[in-house]
Amino acid sequence: MQPIQEIYPLLTTPRRVVITMHQKPDADAMGSALGLYHFLKQFGHEVTVVSPTNWARWLNWMPGCNTVVDFELNRDKAEKIMDAAEWFFCLDFNVLLRTKNMAPKLRSLNCTRILIDHHQQPEEASFAYGVSDTSKSSTCEMIYDFIKGSGHLDKINIEIAECLYAGVMADTGSFRFPAASAAVHEMVSYLKARGLNHTQVHENVYDNFLENRLRFIGHVLLHRMEVYYEYNTALIAISKKDLLRFEIKTGDSDGLVNYPLSIQGIKMAALVIDRDEERKWSFRSKGDFDVNTFARKYFEGGGHYNAAGGRSSASLDQTVEDFHRAMEESAAALQD
Ligand code: 5GP
Ligand code: MN
């Protein structure tokens, strides 16, 4: 993988460009993809964002979101666009498998793949150019760095500002996590100077749910959360029945895993959801408990030190049992 800087001089030659991100894109994945989309279009590139799957309805406010092609929904169209791509940006994921059903197609393409990501252990051999930096708060921050590094900061317009702000805000927990560095605040300062209405973006992301989601959270916190004080750990396990009862859609469970961390002393919060094809895990931690390693070791996953995810093909009951065992094995690190 060559350094990303090497493509700066090539930016001004129009190309057919596709941008993608991890499956079930969140605010950082969608925000970075659309931020880059609005930037590249200004050079005359033919740009399309292809999402590996659908996304949360509360992301639809993002400028350009209505042009995003859902690979699973419009497979023929997506494959045609992918086949024609000269440049293929891969944002906010480290391994091609994170694009799920799109991965084999993405791997088979004979085009220039470019990585911009902040997850650990990227599959570097799959990319011609790229930047991978786990110290970065978000991929949106890295798109800002990319724009700045290429010498085109003046091309940041209100659309780009809104997209990038949304991702940084989401991935830093509204600027509370340690990754919200001085550079992040300087970036936000610049976006504000360009006219960003940050209050509006915050409302678009956090005050845009339907009633059922709030009822669902109430139900889950009351009936589905177990707290293991001896391990400073809390677990939320959600069945298919719960999802159906509250009509939970993609994105409605985002953020749920953070709630148990607000309990005094809790170091690790885990959430497992019984999805059709797998049991999907989310892990969050505070301080020195490394959920990236935990997710890798026990649940075929990974992510960051304090935020990671994983999966299991076992039943919900079985994977919860597996979690209990994993928690017991990690007792020393959880207890100190
Ligand atoms: P979330 O819990 O929000 O789905 O994911 C937390 C973090 O872990 C994100 O940075 C996400 O990209 C990463 N992550 C989630 N699921 C997986 C997974 O199955 N494998 C890997 N390698 N990373 C994951
Ligand atoms: Mn991210």
Image (cartoon, helix red, strand yellow):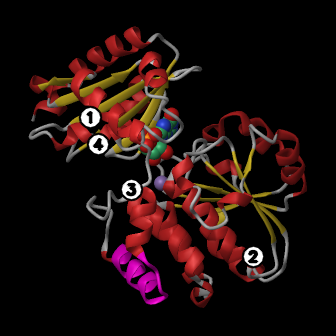
Instruction: Identify which amino acid the numbered label 1 is placed on.
Output: Ala
Decide which of tag 3 and tag 1 comes sooner along the chain: 3
What residue is disc 3 on?
A: 207
Q: Which mark is residue 125?
A: none
Mark 2 and mark 1: span between their CA atoms? 41 Å
- The image quarter in which residue 10 lies: bottom right
Given contact means CB atoms under 8 Å apart, are the residues at marks 4 and 1 in contact?
Answer: yes
Per the image, label 1 sits on a secondary structure element best described as strand
Mark 4 and mark 3: span between their CA atoms? 17 Å
Mark 3 and mark 1: span between their CA atoms? 24 Å
Per the image, label 4 sits on a secondary structure element best described as helix
What residue is disc 2 on?
A: 41
- The image quarter in which residue 1 lies: bottom right
| The magenta segment | 183-197
Mark 4 and mark 1: span between their CA atoms? 7 Å
Side of 65 relative to 76 (left or right): left
Side of 328 relative to 3 (left or right): left
What residue is disc 1 on?
A: 269
Decide which of tag 4 and tag 3 comes sooner along the chain: 3
Q: List the single residue furthest toward the front.
A: 211
Q: Looking at the image, is mark 3 or mark 1 nearer the viewer? A: 3
Measured as percent of width and height from the top left, residue 317 is found at: 38, 9
Measured as percent of width and height from the top left, residue 181 is found at: 31, 70
- The image quarter in which residue 332 lies: top left
What residue is disc 4 on?
A: 258
Decide which of tag 2 and tag 1 comes sooner along the chain: 2
Given contact means CB atoms under 8 Å apart, are the residues at marks 2 and 4 in contact?
Answer: no
* Label total for image: 4
Q: Looking at the image, is mark 2 or mark 3 nearer the viewer? A: 3
Given contact means CB atoms under 8 Å apart, are the residues at marks 2 and 1 in contact?
Answer: no
- Residue 194 inside the magenta-drawn segment: yes
